[in-house]
Structure formats: C-alpha cells, structure tokens
Image: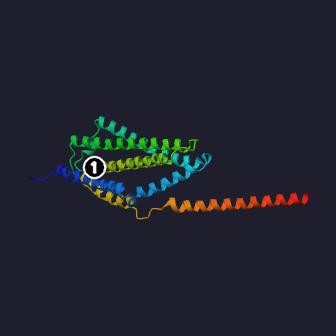
Amino acid sequence: MTFQKEYLDLVLVPLGLLIMLTYHLFLLYRYLHHPHTTAFGFENNDKRAWVERFMQVEKKEASVAITVITSNISAATFLSTVSLTLSSLIGAWLGSSTNNIFESELILGDTRASTISIKYISLLSCFLLAFSCFVQSTRHFVHATYLISMPEDNVPVKYAEIAIIKGGEFWSLGLRALYFALNLLLWFFGPIPMFLSSIILVIILHYLDTNTTPLHNYSTSESCTDQKVADRIYGKATFIDHNNNRGCGLRFDLKF
C-alpha cells in the first residue's frame, strides 16, 4: 500500500485543529477559574475600576468615557465589515467555476474539488462567526454608552461593568475566529503549512494570553487616597469658613 499525499490532510489538519481547540479550552478554564493568570482577567480588572470611576463623576464629564467606548465601537464595526466582505467574496468564489488555482500538483495535499469546497466552507464559517461576534461586541458597547451617559444617578455600576466586559469578550471571540480563519487559509496551500501555523500560533497566543503582573486593588488604595483628599479639602474649607466668621465678628465689634 503506497502512501498518498491525500492522507496528509486526514492526519495533519485534524491534529492542527485539535491543538488549537485544546489550547483555547485550557485558556477558557484559566479565565473562568484563575482569571488573574490571563490577560483577559487583568484587563477586566482595569475595566471595572474605569467604569466605577466614570459612574461616580458628573454626567457632563462623562464625555471622555463615551469617546473611549466610541473608539471600540468603530474598531468592532470595521472588523465586522471586513469579515462580512471576505465572507461575500468567498461565497462568490465558491459559486463560480474558477476554483482551479488551488488544484495545482505543486500543493502537497488533497486537491480534489470536494476537499477544496470543504476548505471554502470552513473558511466562510469562521468569517461569519467573527462577523457575528463583532456585531455583538458593538451592541454591548452601545448599551454601555446609554448607561454611562444616563442623566439619573441611580444606574447600578454593575450594569455598565457587565456591558463593557461582555463587549470585550465578544471582541476577543471575534479575533479568535479570525485566528482560526488564518489557519484554514493556509490549508489551501497544503496541510503542512496549516499544521505548522497551528503550532506557531498557539505558542504566540500563549505568550500574549498569559499574565504575570499582580492585579491592582483599586477599591482599597485608591479609595483611601480619595477619602484623604476629600478630608483635606473639607478641613481646609472648614478652616477658611471659620476664619471668615471670625473676621465678620471682628468687624461687627469695631463698628459698634
């Protein structure tokens, strides 16, 4: 029995996808049970403190927070547009008959028409998933702008925190879908590039997703500092007010 190049797709492609899926399942476990060891948990800690501070300021000063959220909305909208455009191009290419570019004998792997169609459909699914995640990210960020800019002060801070964090989570899911799409795109050039890209991508993502910086406890140190500043301001105002009263009394005595 001779070894055929089509067998490479049956071995390397599932193995590459398994490596990616295993890493992301491990990352999900760390994010849910040990969030401080991930970059997402580190960012969420800062986001909670950021939302809490802006929910305590006057609403006329919340324009900075709205500007920051608007930039995130613009980025998510741009990536969703790119994902949808690529999905449309792939769908048009899949429906056409000019699919012979990846059926060359130079590609070490399965180049049959049925396998090419599977590659297109898999790549299209990743782009559609990325588009859906970026749309959901935009939805949550828009909801956060309503909460932060609401004139009343009785909006729970937890609601704004959930909206911001969920927007960031869907943003991250959209990026992960694009990473998977990159792997599947290299599959068009053969299973070996796809498998190698899976290993390299997991190594890079593990470096980027790991956090070794301790989380800053904003609720203790910053609150104490703010309280000290408020006490100093209040004490200074009391001292000035007391001196003014003494001055008024002195002028009253001199007048009579």
Percent position of residue 206, x then y: 35, 60
Q: Amino acid at mark 1?
A: Trp
226 or 120: nearer the eye? 226
Residue located at (90% from left, 60% from top): 254
Query: Residue 234: x percent and y percent?
Result: 67, 59
Q: Is residue 104 left or right of residue 224?
A: left
- Residue at image x 62%, y 46%? 60
Q: Position of residue 243 (x, y in %)?
A: 77, 61
Closer to the camera in the image, 92 or 210: 210
Spot occupied by residue 146 in the image (x, y as percentages of width and height): 53, 41
Q: Is residue 240 left or right of residue 169?
A: right
Crowdedness near tag 1: few (<14), some (14–19) or many (≥20) residues, C-alpha within 10 Å: many
Residue with the most extreme right position? 256
SS at mark 1 in the image = helix
Q: How many marks?
A: 1
Residue 151: quadrant of the picture: top right
Work out which quarter of the rendered image holds the C terminus and state it.
Answer: bottom right
> Label 1 belongs to which residue?
187
Residue at 50% x, 55% y: name it: 49
